[in-house]
């Protein structure tokens, strides 16, 4: 005998929607890593925030140059 909760899960296997579930999962993962990094600490210049900042600046420069 299967419980009604399991039966309803079989009909709708997504938490939010087919497309938002992966984005939700990625955002939760990034937020968890960011929280871990803040708690554990990193060397100067090696944090997630600084990495993303450098990548964003490089992307802006390459976009202005037309690459």
Image (spheres, helix red, strand yellow):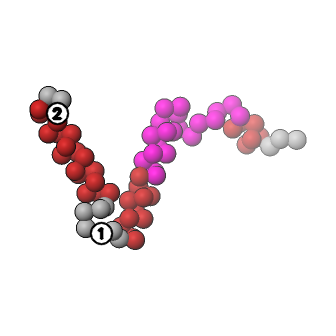
7 lies above or below 41 = above
- The residue lying toward the viewer, choosing from 62 and 11, is 62
Residue 58: name its quadrant.
top left
Q: How many marks?
A: 2
Q: For the view shown, which residue lies furthest in the right direction?
A: 1
Residue for badge 1: 43
Q: For the view shown, which residue lies furthest in the front direction?
A: 67
- The residue lying toward the viewer, choosing from 43 and 48, is 43
Q: For the view shown, which residue lies furthest in the bottom direction?
A: 40
Mark 1, secondary structure of its residue? loop
- The residue lying toward the viewer, choosing from 61 and 19, is 61
Numbered circle sitting on residue 63 = 2
* Direction from residue 38 to residue 22 in the image, left or right: right
* Direction from residue 4 to residue 53 in the image, left or right: left
Instruction: Kindly identify the residue that appears in the image at 18 percent across and 46 percent down.
Output: 57
Instruction: Kindly identify the residue that appears in the image at 69 percent across and 38 percent down.
Output: 9
Check disc 2: other Cα within 10 Å, few if <14, some if 14-19, many if 20+: few
Q: CA distance from mark 2 to mark 1?
A: 30 Å
């Amino acid at each position: 005998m299967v419980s009604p909760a399991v039966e309803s899960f079989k009909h709708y296997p997504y938490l939010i929607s087919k497309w938002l579930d992966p984005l939700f999962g990625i955002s939760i993962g990034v937020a968890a890593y960011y929280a871990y990094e803040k708690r554990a600490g990193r060397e100067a210049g090696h944090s997630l925030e600084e990495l993303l900042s450098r990548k964003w600046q490089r992307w802006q420069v390459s976009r202005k140059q037309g690459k």
